[in-house]
């Protein structure tokens, strides 16, 4: 019994010594990323590292990679020296390296960039194919010879102006219903802000180090995320209250897009929150959740409501060009096209239907719209 009590006292002494020996390190933000035992987390293992004090100080004060710098007001010079000594004295244990660090090594900034380069490449090719199909159905090929007669430069200018005014600025909605324009703009301009912020982050903060909320890029991302979140909330409210929101064709795809967008923004805010709170156990899982949400949103974009952002402006631009050509006096078979691609699309559908029921000379059939 006496031997056991002596052994217990010895163990308590060792534990107490070990805890007090690293109490400064554990009380800093360092442990949030590098683990309580210094064997890694979101950041790499730092236990038993015999860093030179000057080199260690430079890393702490200036940061390295995704690790932000720590000012003297956050970690005093005295505590910095203590952390340096504590880390050097910590034992190295391979078994304590968490899976989060191993996953984090794979999801480095460079590897993540490569993954999303492939994701965006696939999405771009699919979007180009979807847009090609819609323009084909709208009869852009039929309209093109008249564009040549009218002037390709003039046609391109009219199309570009329409993409900006009708597409990006949503001019028609602004004239008809400013409330809907604003709610629509929350998602449209919020997403544009998120994309712009990510591009700026790539150039001005390539290591993705954490930035203060007052930083212009960080503020842009946060405000854009809030705007998108509010827009998603409004659309969800419409799903609940608008009895005609289901068009019978795209509700499932629309709902998929809305959910992926919701999870993308939510996971982005959660990633920022847990990182700032130093909840190291949840940083990597939520970061992976965010990356997966973004990847799924982009990959499904050509086939969900997301495609609305580039298909509708292109179709409206086609209509603007057709209207301008008709008004110029060039005979294209009608005086006005009532809606994006409606004339050529309807004509193509009518010819296909007539051909299927066996009528001959369907190519000679012309459909006319009159104002």
Image (cartoon, rainbow, N blue to C red):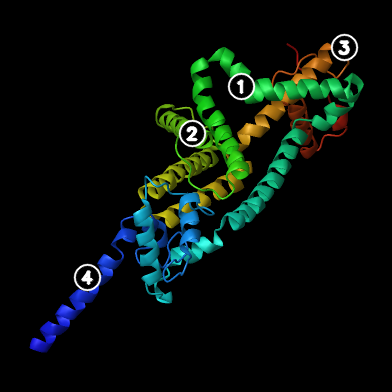
Mark 3 vs mark 2, foreground winner is: 2
Q: Which mark is residue 170?
A: 1
Separation of residues labelled 4 and 3 (CA atoms): 93 Å
- Residue at which label 4 appears: 16
Is 333 located above or below residue 315 in the figure? above
Where does residue 202 sit, x and y in percent of width and height? 61, 44
Label 1, secondary structure: give it.
Answer: loop
Residue at 43% x, 45% y is: 272
* Numbered disc 2: secondary structure: helix
Residue 292 versus residue 82: which sits nearer the camera?
82
Q: Residue at x 49, y 24 (%)?
A: 183
Label 2 crowd bin: few (<14), some (14–19), many (20+), radius 10 Å:
some
Residue 1 visible within the image? no
Horizontal side, residue 133 vs residue 219: left or right: right
Q: Which mark is residue 219?
A: 2
* Mark 1: few/some/many CA within 10 Å (<14, 14-19, 20+): some
- Above or below 317: residue 31: below
Residue bearing the label numbered 3: 329
Residue 2 visible at all: yes
Disc nearest the viewer among 2 and 1 = 2
- Classify the position of the C terminus by image quarter: top right
């Amino acid at each position: 019994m006496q031997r056991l009590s002596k052994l217990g006292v010895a163990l308590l002494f060792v534990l107490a010594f070990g805890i007090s020996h690293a109490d400064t390190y554990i009380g800093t933000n360092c442990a949030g990323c590098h683990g309580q035992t210094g064997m890694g987390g979101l950041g790499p293992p730092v236990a038993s590292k015999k860093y030179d004090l000057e080199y260690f100080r430079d890393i702490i004060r200036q940061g390295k990679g995704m690790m932000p710098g720590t000012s003297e007001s956050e970690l005093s010079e005295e505590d910095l020296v203590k952390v340096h000594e504590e880390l050097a004295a910590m034992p190295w244990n391979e078994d304590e390296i968490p899976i989060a660090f191993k996953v984090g090594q794979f999801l480095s900034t460079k590897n993540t960039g490569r993954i999303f380069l492939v994701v965006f490449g696939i999405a771009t090719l699919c979007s180009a194919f979807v847009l090609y199909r819609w323009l084909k159905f709208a009869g852009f090929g039929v309209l093109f010879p008249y564009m040549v007669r009218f002037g390709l430069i003039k046609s391109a200018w009219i199309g570009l102006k329409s993409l900006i005014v009708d597409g990006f600025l949503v001019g028609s909605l602004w004239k008809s219903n400013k409330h809907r324009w604003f709610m629509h703009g929350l998602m449209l301009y919020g997403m544009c802000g998120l994309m712009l912020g990510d591009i700026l982050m790539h150039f001005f903060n390539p290591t993705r180090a954490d930035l203060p909320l007052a930083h212009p890029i960080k503020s842009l991302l946060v405000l854009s995320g809030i705007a998108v979140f509010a827009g998603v909330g409004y659309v969800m409210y419409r799903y609940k209250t608008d009895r005609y929101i289901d068009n019978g064709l795209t509700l499932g795809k629309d709902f998929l897009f809305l959910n992926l967008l919701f999870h993308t923004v939510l996971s982005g805010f959660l990633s920022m929150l847990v990182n700032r709170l130093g909840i190291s156990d949840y940083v990597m899982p939520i970061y992976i959740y965010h990356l997966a949400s973004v990847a799924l949103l982009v990959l499904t974009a050509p086939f969900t409501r997301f495609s609305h952002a580039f298909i509708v402006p292109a179709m409206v631009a086609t209509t603007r060009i057709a209207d301008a050509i008709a008004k110029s006096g060039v005979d294209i078979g009608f005086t006005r096209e009532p809606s994006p691609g409606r004339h050529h699309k309807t004509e193509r559908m009518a010819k296909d239907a007539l051909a299927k029921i066996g009528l001959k000379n369907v190519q000679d059939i012309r459909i006319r719209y009159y104002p």
